Image (cartoon, grey):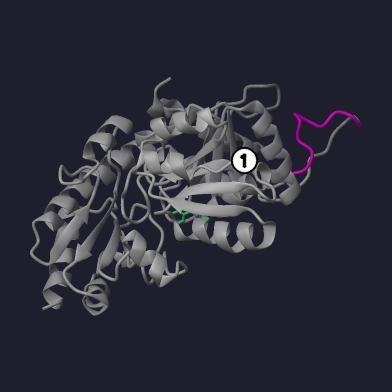
Amino acid sequence: MKFETKAIHVGEEPDFKEGASGDVVIPIHLSSTFARKRVEKPTQGYEYSRTGNPTRCALENRLAALEEATFGLAFASGMAAETTLALTLLKAGDHILAFDDLYGGTRRLFNRILQQSFKVEASYVDARDLEKVEESIRENTRLIWLESPTNPLMRLCDIEAISQIAKKFSILVVVDNTFMSPYFQKPLLLGAPIVVHSTTKYLNGHSDSVAGAIMLSDEMIYHRLKFNQNALGSILSPFDSFLVLRGIKTLAIRMREHERNAFRIADYLEGHPRVRKVYYPGLRSHSQHALAERQASGFGGMLSFEIDGGLEEAGRFLENLKIFALAESLGGVESLIEHPAKMTHASIPRETREQIGITDSLIRVSVGLENPDDLIGDLDHAFHTMT
Ligand SMILES: Cc1ncc(COP(=O)(O)O)c(C=O)c1O
């Protein structure tokens, strides 16, 4: 089955069993508990909704299929997925090595919770450089955590090469595949054993649900994660499971359009005199364009750029946009724009931010599905207000 077909059908196959109604769309099973006829036989395997719920199960099967994984798990948020993963795979004294350009909330989880309260060490490396990655591995390194492209600087790492390095040292690799979505990039096929998502973004795609996911094929780790998901209670609700199932049906078509619009915006920005630099892996000017072409089947809908000016000019530009919403998050049908240093990445100390390259003139864009002429008109108007 091809990607588009899986995205519509897996998990929602009509039920023709005696007494079933053959729904084309799975019902939202709101029941918190499930009655059984015999003490030792839960009905269809369901007993209590935290442990298992038919609507969530449908979503989990679809999520697995999209990433070419055997197992999928759906969580209350991307961070709930990350926390459950970290608490399952790490213990006090272990070390986690992460790409230094990372979603701010992931860094906060590592530094402020895992390091401070659970005595798990975390260190960061520029994962564009394979030698540096290998050199940064410690005796107690258990996990390598990657985003590609990164948030917000759109840097890439070679997932296949890093997975091979990790294998030599028996270290697990986790790839946060939120930015690309499984439509454009499949880390499991590149050798990474675990994928996480904030499905809040492209997978749901409509900015109306907060959710997360883990996809993997290792049965032993899956059972540990499933046990901990139930024990910690980090599950996704039936209604949100339904929303994500619905959103995924149009993932392929949305991703193609996000990318088409992103190319138009990137080209426009690259030619604008008030823009110093555009970071979009689809541009030939992107230093890792060749890796982007090799590793993924597309370049996605996210880009960032350096505006010609500092905090004040960036602020004036952002506050004068009318169609782009000045908001955190990404991956929805509506175009969103934000200032990483003051918004998504404000929890990172200024010094660290500057070391990585998140300056006060950096602006991140999630290109939506509006008509690109309207989007360019909106940007044009905001640039004019800067002068
Ligand atoms: C790349 C990435 N990973 C993880 C997360 C966390 O996901 P959530 O907000 O669904 O908890 C985000 C949120 O912005 C993100 O951008």
- Secondary structure character of the magenta stretch overall: loop
Q: Residues within 10 Å of mark 1 (few under 14, many from 20)?
A: many
Q: Is residue 12 left or right of residue 99?
A: right
User: In the structure shown, which secondary structural element does the residue marked by tag 1 occupy?
Assistant: helix
Which quadrant of the structure image shows residue 160? top left
Which quadrant of the structure image shows residue 226? top right
- Kind of residue sitting beneath label 1: Arg
Q: Is residue 76 above or below residue 68?
A: below
Query: What residue is drawn where x is 56% and y is 42%?
Result: 143
Q: Residue 12 appears at what percent x and percent y?
A: 55, 31
Q: Residue 235 appears at what percent x and percent y?
A: 65, 48
Q: Is residue 274 left or right of residue 103?
A: left
Q: Residue 213 appears at what percent x and percent y?
A: 55, 43
The answer to whether any part of residue 24 appears in the image is no
Quarter of the image with the N terminus in it: top left
Extreme-top residue of the structure:
1
Q: Nearer the viewer, residue 182 or 375?
A: 182
Query: What residue is drawn where x is 55% and y is 26%?
Result: 13
Q: Which residues are magenta?
A: 39-51
Residue matched to label 1: 56
Marker count (numbered): 1
Residue 47 forms part of the magenta stretch: yes
Residue 127 forms part of the magenta stretch: no
Query: What residue is drawn where x is 27% and y is 65%?
Result: 362
Q: Nearer the viewer, residue 357 or 253?
A: 357
Quarter of the image with the C terminus in it: bottom left
Q: Residue 40 appears at what percent x and percent y?
A: 89, 29
